[in-house]
Amino acid sequence: MLLRLRAIAHHPVIRLVLAYLAGASTALAFAPYALWPIYPLAMAFALWHSRRLTPKQTFLYWLSFGFGSFSVGISWVHVSIDTYGGLPLIASLGLMAILALYLALYPALAAYLSIKLVPKSLTLRFLAVFPAAWVLTEWARGWVLTGFPWLWGGYSQTNGPLAPLASNIGALGLSLVLAMIAGALALAFTHSAEGQGSNGVSSNGVSSNRPRSLSLQAAPLLIITSLAGLGSFASAQLSPITPTGKSVKVALVQGNIAQSMKWQPEALWPTMIKYMDLSRQSLADTDLFIWPEAAIPAPEYMVEEFLDNANKVANLNNSAIITGIISKQQNRFYNSLIVLGNHQQLQQESADYRGDGSNEFRKHHLLPIGEFVPLEDLLRPLAPFFNLPMSSFARGDFQQPNLDAVGHQLAPAICYEIAFPEQLRANVNAGTELLLTVSNDAWFGRSNGPLQHMEIAQMRAIELGRPLLRATNNGITAVVDSQGKITHSLPQFETGVLKAEVPLVSGSTGFARWGQTPLLLLCTIILIGAVIRRLRL
């Protein structure tokens, strides 16, 4: 019976179905489910199940695994395509499938490289070459064609026991650890299945010492998990991040403006007045007010009167308002953050707002289709999906000065940018006190997208060792401490103001100093070593 089940499991069609289901299950490792053990278990099953396949079969197997992972894990992308894209359902589903299939190429390439380079030694393949290839392909997915680093394996650990390790090795480093744990599990499964027959007899017919065999099978797994656990414990206990004893009082305003109304001309003034009225409730005891991405849904020059008034109100109360807006410089439009109020310690209550581009952050990593359209002359006429409002932004610099708000230094990232660790890291310096990200996830409704987005933002706080403020249009608006834990939050889809006193910290994490470079070098050296070994055999 067991042999029959194994034969069924390895039927070409059933094999690909099982690969898809294993990949699909990884969605449960991320927000909102956060069942982090599923990720290494699913990967271990896929490694074990594909261990005897040819390179071509391995590629197709892991392509199916990746397709399952992304077609389920980022299915929320379809919400915006279907709701705002103006495409027939079959066309929007087709676009979603193409995206998932493209992203699936990366895990397929990792598995293909590992079996091509190490066709015989499962130990070397599972414990070193596959994890290194997995990390390098995840990294490549984060920059090829502008990048889509969503669902990196390491994000499944944002609220898991290995999270503190990210302060030194980052989210990609956690991906390496998880891949090695998965490889060790797969190796143990393989030895257990192939090294033992029924009644404790080995495959060559010789009686075996089962307890001893089991201990040997489990040795790599025990070693890797023990080292990972000790590293996580040490990262938490020996953290260089220490409280300064100072704090800042913040108010994050969640306007909950319907996406269908956001860019309507008649909604402009009601929207701005709503944000101002919500903020007035906390003017007396707040240092920083944070309004979300494009909270002011108009170019800066069109709302000068409102900006000047808000600037004076903030100055009067010795506070600052940081808001998303569309700025214009030299006939180019930017998705920006500006600072209103006492951002230069102006003491004159009547000081006018100066929209001169100083103390402003311009989004660098633009979202394809949403903020710029590749091949726009070809694509824009095809469907409304390629002609969304505000989809012609210019790109800001990769590295920009921190925003200065009532003397506090904030390193910003607008929406999608928070998924790119090296960009935010490049904008954090010794004087940075807070990380700031603003977003408008109303495009994705009640899907898992905004929850995964929040999870990614938490990881940036762990990596860079700074509290993070996240203001959104309709959720999740939250304050995150320097260990990546949410300390304050607002419910989604509700209008509200989140008030918090945020303790400030000092010190620099290993990731803030070194970034991804040591990890990428290590993985590259492993693959080069595998290539040299392969050529010598």
Image (cartoon, rainbow, N blue to C red):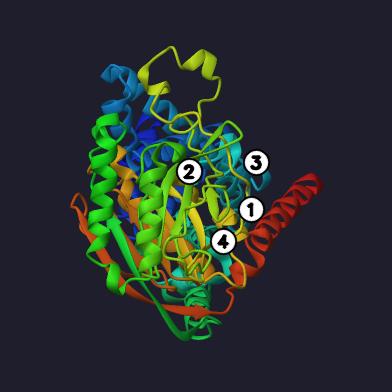
In percent of width and height, residue 471 lies at 35, 56
On screen, 460 above or below 142? Answer: below
Q: Which sits earlier in the primary sequence, circle 3 or circle 1?
A: 3
Pair 2/1: label in front: 1
- Asked if one can make out residue 536 in the rendered structure from this viewpoint, the answer is yes
Most extreme residue toward the left, as rendered?
494
Mark 2, Cα crowd under 10 Å, few <14 / some 14-19 / many 20+, is many
Q: Nearer the viewer, residue 496 or 21?
A: 496
Residue type, mark 2 in image: Ser
Residue type, mark 4 in image: Asn
Which quarter of the figure has residue 486? Answer: bottom left
Q: Which sits earlier in the primary sequence, circle 2 or circle 1?
A: 2
Which quarter of the figure has residue 197? Answer: bottom left
Q: Which sits earlier in the primary sequence, circle 3 or circle 4?
A: 3
Q: Residue at x 26, y 67 (%)?
A: 282
**How far apart are the alpha carbons under marks 1 and 4?**
9 Å
On screen, 329 above or below 308? Answer: above
Q: Which residue is mark 4?
A: 402
**How far apart are the alpha carbons under marks 2 and 4?**
48 Å
In percent of width and height, residue 71 lies at 36, 36
